[in-house]
Amino acid sequence: MSPQQAVERTGQRAPAEPRKGFRRGPATRASTKRTYVLMLMPALLLVIGIMIPFLNGIWTSLTNKKSYINDPSFVGLENYIELFTDESFLRALGRTILYVVVVLAVQLPLAILAAILLARSSVGSWMARRVLVLPLLIPPIVAGLMWKTMLQPSAGVINYLLGLVGIPPQPWLTDISTSLGSVILIDTWAFLPFSTLIILAGLQSLPNEIKEASQVDGAGPWNVFRHISLPWIAPYVVLVAIFRVADSFKQFDLVWPVTRGGPIDSTRLLHVMGYEEVFRFSSTARGMAVIFVLWILVYTVSSYLLKVWRRTINAVG
């Protein structure tokens, strides 16, 4: 009986005949392996290019290498022990952590507020989006030098504008009580647009049907934001926090051209300290130890924030 006759009699479809598998010959398998190797080569070269300087930096931090010592010797953890017993390092560590915390506390709420305002459909928001990206086009070093000129106590345009409304000149970058806050102000101007654009993308990805349904149920603007918009953009906010934490911990481009760590070490962050240890005090090993401590801080905080980001993704999705 043929398969067609069996189908007609039983009313069921006959099982399909198994297809003959395609067997790759030795030449085909070798070509496939070569393709995989060629595809992995750029990634392998990237890993090697990253790991060699990284491991060399760790090894250097375990020696007594200085610019005037041709044959450094291994000293173990001596550089790290000296760092954590050095008051200047501990002050720089605390100052760096304070800098990161204040940057996040200031920039995240401002970025959320700016994103909400820019998400509205109006001519003003359309124009503001175009203007918002302008600070991103300026390199941080140039932005720092520009603001350093604007914040000059005697000839700066900021104090001139304050004088028009009766406010006396302020020692923005020349006083230990205001220098760190002034650097944070410059950081906010330079990087707030980046944070705003990411959160704005999250707001614009929120389906309008969800907000319209909540408004039909009688929810006001605050309740819509609190119970719908904010949970929706939470992954974007955490993503911004990850980027800003990494950037703020290793901030150097804004600090060095503006204050060079002064006055009286009031803006001497860890990255600035590591730079000075190498190029000012010729202590390459101690500078590498400072940078490696900074790397551990960035890695630890970023890893925690990545876990928070995954939880927010699962909560939304």
Image: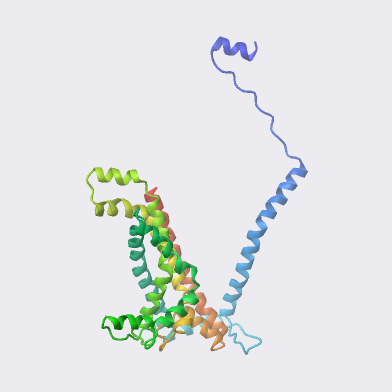
Against 257, residue 47 (above or below) is: above
Residue at 57% x, 83% y: name it: 284
Against 110, residue 120 (above or below) is: above
Q: Can residue 304 be seen in this view?
A: no
The image shows a total of numbered marks equal to: 0
Residue at 65% x, 56% y: name it: 40
Residue closest to the far right? 27
Place of residue 247 in the rendered image (x, y in percent of width and height, measured from the top left)? 46, 70
Place of residue 267 in the rendered image (x, y in percent of width and height, measured from the top left)? 41, 82
On screen, residue 25 versus residue 235, left or right, reads: right
Against 258, residue 138 (above or below) is: above
On screen, residue 118 versus residue 52, left or right, reads: left
Q: Nearer the viewer, residue 102 or 146?
A: 146
On screen, residue 218 versus residue 172, left or right, reads: left
Q: Which of 183 and 289 is in front in this view?
A: 183
Place of residue 131 in the rendered image (x, y in percent of width and height, measured from the top left)? 42, 64
Residue at 47% x, 80% y: name it: 145
On screen, residue 114 versus residue 64, left or right, reads: left
Q: In which quarter of the image is residue 311?
A: bottom left
Q: Is residue 171 visible?
A: yes
Residue at 55% x, 84% y: name it: 278
